[in-house]
Amino acid sequence: MTKIYLIRHAEAEGNLYRRIHGHYDGDITPRGYEQIALLAERFRDIEIDALYASDLQRTQKTAAAITKHHSIPLNIEPRLKEVCMGVWEEKPWGNVGYDEPEQLLFFSNDPAKWNVEGRESFEDLKARITGVIVELGERHEGQTIACFSHGMAIRTLISGIKGISSERIHEILHGDNTCVSLLSFDNGKLEIEYYNDNSHLPPEMSTFANQSWWKNRDKVDFSNLRFIPMDLNEDSELYCRCYRDGWEEAHGTLRGYSDKPYLRSALRVSDKDPQSLMKTFCGDEFAGIIELDPDRMADEGAGWISLCYLVPEMRGKNYGVQLVGHAVSVYRKLGRKSLRLHVSENNKRAISFYKNLGFKCIGIQEGSSFPLWLMEKEL
């Protein structure tokens, strides 16, 4: 008999930023690295004979939970990777949920009916992930192995082993980041001892404990932001109102603020690339603005964030990370190595927010009211 630990990757950018990462190769988040450390303690005294991960960096980095306490090579197995999401890859979940709600519900609740351009079918995914797990089980007869894979791939495998059809897949809940399933393979048959166990994570380290989308089955969850290019021919007043509010919130005064230069800069970047100026919505409710300036600091390989703004009623609800996620998406495609922005030294809440996302202060400059921290996050 072969014992197979099947483990989902730690929290990655797609999980945090609420963007669709199937084959997209997103990185691990700061909390993801803390999850890996906790997972390593879980496996400290469990003997592992062979170690496998998909060819995406989020599983390979999570596999460090095994190699931290065990001297064992990591084998890359592409068939363990996540389902290919086709044209949905790298889109915000909020846009897909708003524009294609029926397809999103199919994906979550009856994936055999899910059909978007370029996607990997449910049956193909099931055959792929089941085939590789069976093959590894046969290869390592009598041993214990660990395989690092992805959420939908694991959910599909578990449903197949339990004989649950596509329309009943809601009976298999989504698994938290770093959740562990233990399978056995004997005489050509896979069996489940347990699955989706995240008992090594305290609530503050659980990705799912801080999100609600996975609890909804019969309706689309509109807690994920959707992004729309901002047309300043129609939205100039809204833009200025938001910028003024953000300035006053950050500095405690409107001293030094003027609409014209910021509006002029926004027109420049949005004319060059509409993705550089986006308004965001939670369902139909306006949520905020993200403005980028790809020209600024481009010679240093950095991507500049000019404005990251949420309306007051949307603050403190974990939406700001999705704005930063848009900047990551845009600038990574441009080959930038980092994100940069200014934060008023007096804006302690914003400084804490950016530090939690991995930004560090790399310099201090004079501002109109308070010194400005130049903060940077590596991509």
Image (tube, rainbow, N blue to C red):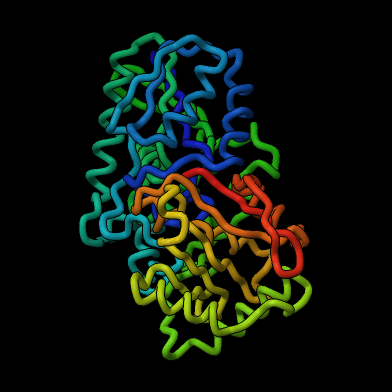
Q: Position of residue 323 (x, y in %)?
A: 53, 63
| Residue plotted at (25% across, 62% down) | 116
Q: Depth check: 370 or 40 in front?
A: 370
Q: In this rendering, would 114 be left or right of 142?
A: left
Question: 239 or 176: nearer the eye?
Answer: 239
Whether residue 266 sits left or right of residue 120 in the image: it is right
**Residue 280 image position (x, y, % from top left):** 50, 73
Residue drawn at x 44%, y 18% as measured from the top left: 3
Q: Is residue 269 above or below residue 374?
A: below
- Closer to the camera, 178 or 190? 178
**Which quadrant of the view contains residue 110?**
bottom left
Q: Is residue 14 left or right of residue 188?
A: right
> Residue 99 appears at what percent x and percent y?
36, 74
The N terminus - image quarter:
top left
Q: Quadrant of residue 132?
A: top left
Q: Is residue 313 visible?
A: no
